[in-house]
Image (spheres, rainbow, N blue to C red):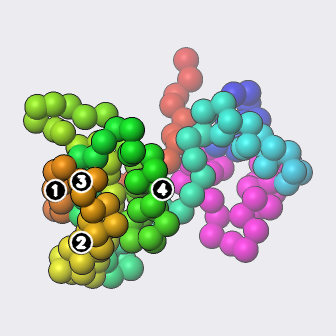
Amino acid sequence: MDATDRRIVAATQAGLPLVAEPYHAVAEAVGLPVAEVMERMRRMLAAGAIRRIGAVPNHYALGYRANGMAVWDVDDARVDALGARIAQLGLASHCYSRPRHPPDWPYNLFTMVHGRDRAEAERGVEAIAAVLGDAVRARDVLFSTRILKKTGLRLGREG
């Protein structure tokens, strides 16, 4: 990252501005054309300096108080296809695979399900289970007990 990239990151590390044209606002803040800001962000994304650009909703503020990470043990050869099917349902805000850690952690597919209460979240988990069918060897749901602060990329001190 050069100094200009660092200015862009500094201008966005608390989140993109909540305006109709957020990249225009960032461009104005850093004194660059919009096209250059967007190209530099694309380059940082491709290089891995920025992992992703996306919304990070506060589920609690939106009324979703029951947040459950449903974890599934499915065949590794099918995990990507099954994850794609789950993602299409629109029931999970996150759906991804992770390595297992046997014998204590046999799960390789993770889905975050939200509900206004635990019963609503559990209905979402059951709907996912129905789609997964006999592909599931084991499963569990881990409900959040507190809110963790979510932050994006942060620049450290230089020198």
Residue on which the image places disc 3: 136
Whether residue 127 can be seen here = yes
On the image, numbered disc 2 is attached to which residue?
126
What residue occupies the far left of the structure in this picture?
Answer: 104
Q: Quadrant of the C terminus?
A: top right
> Is 149 on the left-hand or right-hand side of 157?
left
* Residues drawn in magenta: 10-32
Q: Residues within 10 Å of mark 2 (few under 14, many from 20)?
A: few
Q: Nearer the viewer, mark 1 or mark 3?
A: 3
Residue type of the residue flagged with mark 2: Glu
**The residue positioned farthest toward the front in the image shown:** 134
Q: Earlier in the sequence, mark 3 or mark 2?
A: 2
What residue sits right under mark 4 in the picture? Answer: 84
- The earlier-in-sequence mark between 4 and 1 is 4
Q: Secondary structure at mark 3?
A: loop
Q: Which circle marks residue 140 in the picture?
A: 1
Contact (Cβ within 8 Å) of mark 2 with mark 1: no
Where disc 1 sits, the SS reads strand
Which is more N-terminal, label 1 or label 2? 2
- Residues under labels 1 and 3: Cα distance? 11 Å
- Mark 4 or mark 2: whose residue is earlier in sequence: 4
Label 3, label 4: how many angstroms apart (C-alpha)? 15 Å
Find the distance from the CA under tag 4 to the CA under tag 1: 20 Å
Q: From the top left corner, tell me how far across and down residue 50 is, in percent.
A: 60, 40
Q: Nearer the viewer, mark 2 or mark 1?
A: 2
Point out residue 29 in the picture as x, y percentages from the top left corner.
76, 54
* Callout 2: SS: helix
Mark 1 Cα-neighbour bin, 10 Å: few <14, some 14–19, many ≥20: some
- Quadrant in the picture for residue 114: bottom left
